[in-house]
Image (cartoon, rainbow, N blue to C red):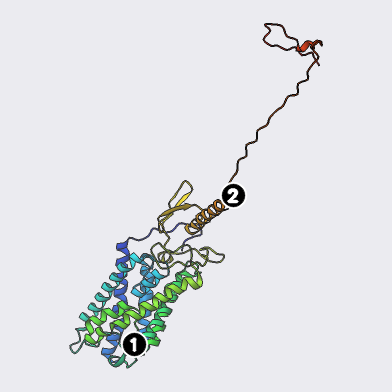
């Protein structure tokens, strides 16, 4: 766990992340479906054993690879992470491919090892999921709703325990594993429990055409349930910081701080689930908005800047329309001098006397 004020650990490369997803999904399918196939071969089928095997396998792999890739091991979990703003959509496709490869390899290894039993028949006996007449007789609509609800619960728990505000990040893998085990305890009698398209696809490829024909439900229902959980979690409980660029849907709900009293700093597993967005581009008091492809002042959002510009333009237009025409009036002042006529025989005052050639100079006595 990081100490307060410490920096985040360097992120893993995409190759390391995909390798972790392949290995983790391989173990999940091989251990989980193996507990079904081997127990069925021995005639000792147990819901508790199968459920705990799936849960323990996930818990171990999360502890092992959570710091590397976030330990999704499930396309539905990756979709939920992207919907919740924890992961960019451009990475989801790569994760899903890695998970499908891991599931196929896990089922292939199980198929090869089961050939050690001479009487083993893989058709309908690979731990695949099923509904209706092919499975337990459970109706398709009920199976769809069950898988949707269970996946939504599972993804919600994952988003909650990997939240940076979670006080006990070291217990996150345990909580995830126990949740998956509990889901299996409930859903095994109905559908065999999927909540994971990769887990369903891998064994179905070796279990015959009936299993492949029913894959649509175990792909679609978990994805829909995960999408609902990914959208609902940040809407209901907020989000630490901003969503990862290129991820789900942004909400107007205020963001909550990562460090709150009584809560620890995120560990490496939480870092994979709470990826930080790229640093903003700031120049001369302006910040670049990659989504809107425009600049806006630092300290304001692009929406606030657009609203301010619109308000200023509207105010300028209103002032121009309301300003009256200016009339200019030219006033001319006429100065009239009063001249007092003197008697012809009266001598002019000395200051008014002038000599010829003096240029009209007047001498005024001192006052």
Residue 53 x, y percent position in the rendering: 35, 81
Q: Helix, strand, or loop for circle 2? A: loop
Q: Nearer the viewer, residue 1 or 145?
A: 145
User: Mark 2 packing: few (<14 Cα in 10 Å), some, or many (20+)?
Assistant: few
Residue bearing the label numbered 1? 191
Residue at the (25%, 85%) spot, across then down: 213
Residue 131: mark:
none
Residue drawn at x 68%, y 30% as measured from the top left: 334
Residue 214 location, quadrant: bottom left
Compared across the picture, whether 92 is left or right of 320 comes to left
Can residue 59 be seen from the camera position used here? Answer: yes
User: Which one is nearer the viewer's eye here, 49 or 253?
Assistant: 253
1 and 2 marks in contact (CB < 8 Å): no
Quarter of the image with the C terminus is: top right
Residue 171 visible to an observer of this rendering:
no
Is 59 placed left or right of 348 in the picture? Answer: left
Which one is in front, 68 or 223?
223
Query: Residue 28's spot in the image, x, y percent?
Result: 32, 77
Label 1 SS: helix
Residue 45 percent location from the top left of the image: 32, 90
Percent position of residue 42, x then y:
27, 90
Rounded to the nearest whole Å, what is the CA distance between mark 1 and mark 2?
79 Å
Front disc: 1 or 2: 2
* Horizontal side of residue 291 vs 109, given as left or right: right
Q: Nearer the viewer, residue 74 or 362?
A: 362
> If you read the primary sequence from the N terminus, does the residue marked by circle 1 or circle 2 appear first?
1
Image-quadrant location for residue 195: bottom left
Identified at 38% across, 79% down, the residue is: 55
Q: Residues within 10 Å of mark 1 (few under 14, many from 20)?
A: many
Q: Which residue is mark 2?
A: 324
């Amino acid at each position: 766990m990081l100490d307060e004020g410490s920096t985040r650990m360097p992120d893993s490369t995409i190759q390391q992340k995909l390798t972790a997803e392949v290995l983790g999904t391989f173990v999940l399918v091989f251990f989980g479906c193996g507990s079904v196939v081997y127990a069925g071969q021995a005639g000792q089928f147990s819901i508790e054993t199968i459920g705990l095997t799936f849960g323990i396998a996930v818990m171990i792999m999360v502890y092992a690879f959570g710091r590397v890739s976030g330990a999704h091991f499930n396309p539905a979990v990756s979709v939920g992470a992207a919907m919740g703003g924890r992961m960019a959509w451009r990475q989801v496709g790569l994760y899903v491919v890695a998970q499908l490869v891991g599931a196929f390899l896990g089922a292939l290894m199980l198929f090869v090892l089961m050939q050690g039993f001479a009487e083993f028949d893989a058709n309908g006996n690979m731990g695949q999921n099923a509904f209706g007449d092919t499975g337990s007789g459970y109706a398709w609509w009920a199976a769809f709703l069950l898988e949707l609800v269970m996946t939504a619960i599972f993804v919600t728990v994952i988003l909650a325990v990997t939240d940076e505000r979670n006080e006990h990040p070291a217990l996150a893998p345990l909580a995830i594993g126990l949740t998956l085990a509990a889901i299996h305890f409930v859903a095994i009698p109905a559908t065999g429990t999927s909540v994971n398209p990769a887990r369903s696809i891998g064994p179905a490829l070796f279990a015959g055409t009936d299993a492949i024909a029913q894959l649509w439900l175990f792909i679609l229902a978990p994805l829909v349930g995960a999408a609902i959980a990914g959208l609902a979690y940040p809407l209901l409980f907020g989000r630490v910081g901003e969503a990862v660029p290129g991820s789900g849907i942004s909400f107007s709900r205020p963001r909550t701080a990562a460090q709150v009293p009584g809560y620890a700093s995120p560990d490496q597993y939480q870092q994979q689930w709470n990826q930080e967005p790229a640093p903003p581009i700031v120049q001369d008091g302006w910040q670049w908005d990659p989504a809107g492809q425009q600049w806006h002042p630092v300290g304001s959002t692009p929406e606030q800047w657009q609203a301010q510009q619109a308000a200023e333009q509207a105010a300028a237009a209103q002032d121009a329309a309301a300003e009256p025409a200016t009339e200019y009036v030219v006033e001319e002042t006429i100065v009239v001098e009063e001249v007092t006529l003197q008697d012809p025989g009266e001598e002019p005052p000395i200051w008014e006397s002038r000599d010829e050639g003096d240029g009209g100079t007047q001498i005024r006595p001192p006052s």
